[in-house]
Image (tube, rainbow, N blue to C red):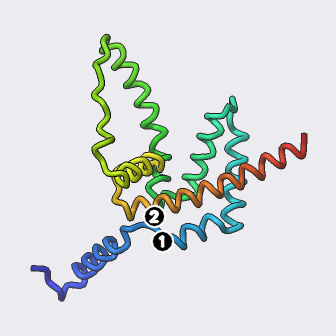
C-alpha cells in the first residue's frame, strides 16, 4: 500500500492522475483559438518565408515539405500530427533505403490478397480513412482522432491563409 503521509509519493500520485486526466490532448476551443490568433499567423508566415528562402531547388514537394515542417514546429510538438510530421522526415528516408534493399533481395513479387474493406461497417471504414489522412493518428481511438483532426484542420486553415498571403504578395510585386 502507498504511504499517504509521505509528500513525495503523494505528489507522484497526483502527477500521474493529472497526466491521465490531461491525456486527451488539447481542447477544441483552445486549438482553434491558438491557430486563429493574429500573432500565431504572423509568426507562422515569417517562419514559412524564411524556410522557403532557404530552399535550394524549390519544387512543389519541397515547398509542401517546408510548409508542413514549419507548421509542425509552430505546434511545438503538442499534438500527435506535429510530432509525426517532424519524425516522418527521418522515417521517410529510412523507408526509401529499405525499399531499395527489398527490391534487390526480392526478384518475384508475391500476389496480394484482396482487400477486406467490405467486411468493415461503413463508419469504421470512414474512421480508418480519416486516421490515414491525419499524420501520426492511425491507431487512435475515435475521440482522440477527432480532437487531433480538429486541431490539424485549424492548423491547415492557417497554412492556407499564410500561403495565400505570400502568393498575393509575390503576384503584386511581379
Q: Would you say the residues marked 2 and 1 are in contact, meaning their CB atoms lie under 8 Å apart?
A: yes
Residue depicted at 61% across the width and 34% down the height: 61
Residue 117's tag is none
User: Where residue 48 sits in the image (x, y, percent)?
Assistant: 68, 49
Which is nearer the N-term, disc 2 or disc 1? 1
Judge whether 58 appears above or below 51 on screen.
Answer: above
User: Where residue 17 sits in the image (x, y, percent)?
Assistant: 29, 76
Residue depicted at 59% across the width and 40% down the height: 65
Quarter of the image with the C terminus is: top right
Residue 27's tag is 1
Q: Is residue 130 left or right of residue 40?
A: left
For this orientation, the residue located farthest to the top is: 107
SS label for mark 2: helix
Quarter holding residue 2: bottom left
What whole-number distance in Å separates the C-alpha atoms at marks 2 and 1? 7 Å
Judge whether 73 appears above or below 14 on screen.
Answer: above
Quarter of the image with the N terminus is: bottom left
Q: Is residue 135 left or right of residue 44?
A: left
Label 2 Cα crowd, 10 Å radius (few <14 / some 14-19 / many 20+): some
Label 1 Cα crowd, 10 Å radius (few <14 / some 14-19 / many 20+): few
Judge whether 109 appears above or below 124 on screen.
Answer: above
Depth order, front residue of 77/110: 110
Q: How many marks?
A: 2
Quarter holding residue 20: bottom left
Residue 147's tag is 2
For this orientation, the residue located farthest to the left is: 1
Judge whether 146 appears above or below 55 on screen.
Answer: below
Amino acid at each position: 500500500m502507498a504511504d499517504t503521509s509521505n509528500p513525495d509519493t503523494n505528489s507522484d500520485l497526483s502527477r500521474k492522475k493529472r497526466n491521465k486526466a490531461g491525456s486527451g490532448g488539447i481542447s477544441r476551443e483552445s486549438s482553434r483559438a491558438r491557430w486563429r490568433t493574429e500573432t500565431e499567423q504572423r509568426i507562422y508566415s515569417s517562419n514559412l518565408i524564411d524556410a522557403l528562402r532557404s530552399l535550394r531547388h524549390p519544387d512543389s514537394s519541397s515547398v509542401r515539405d517546408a510548409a508542413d515542417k514549419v507548421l509542425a514546429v509552430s505546434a511545438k510538438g503538442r499534438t500527435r500530427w506535429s510530432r509525426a510530421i517532424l519524425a516522418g522526415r527521418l522515417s521517410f528516408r529510412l523507408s526509401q533505403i529499405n525499399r531499395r534493399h527489398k527490391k534487390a533481395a526480392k526478384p518475384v513479387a508475391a500476389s496480394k490478397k484482396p482487400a477486406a474493406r467490405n467486411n468493415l461497417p461503413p463508419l469504421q471504414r470512414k474512421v480508418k480513412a480519416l486516421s490515414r489522412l491525419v499524420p501520426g493518428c492511425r491507431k487512435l481511438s475515435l475521440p482522440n482522432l477527432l480532437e487531433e483532426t480538429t486541431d490539424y484542420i485549424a492548423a491547415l486553415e492557417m497554412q492556407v491563409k499564410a500561403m495565400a498571403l505570400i502568393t498575393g504578395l509575390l503576384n503584386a510585386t511581379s
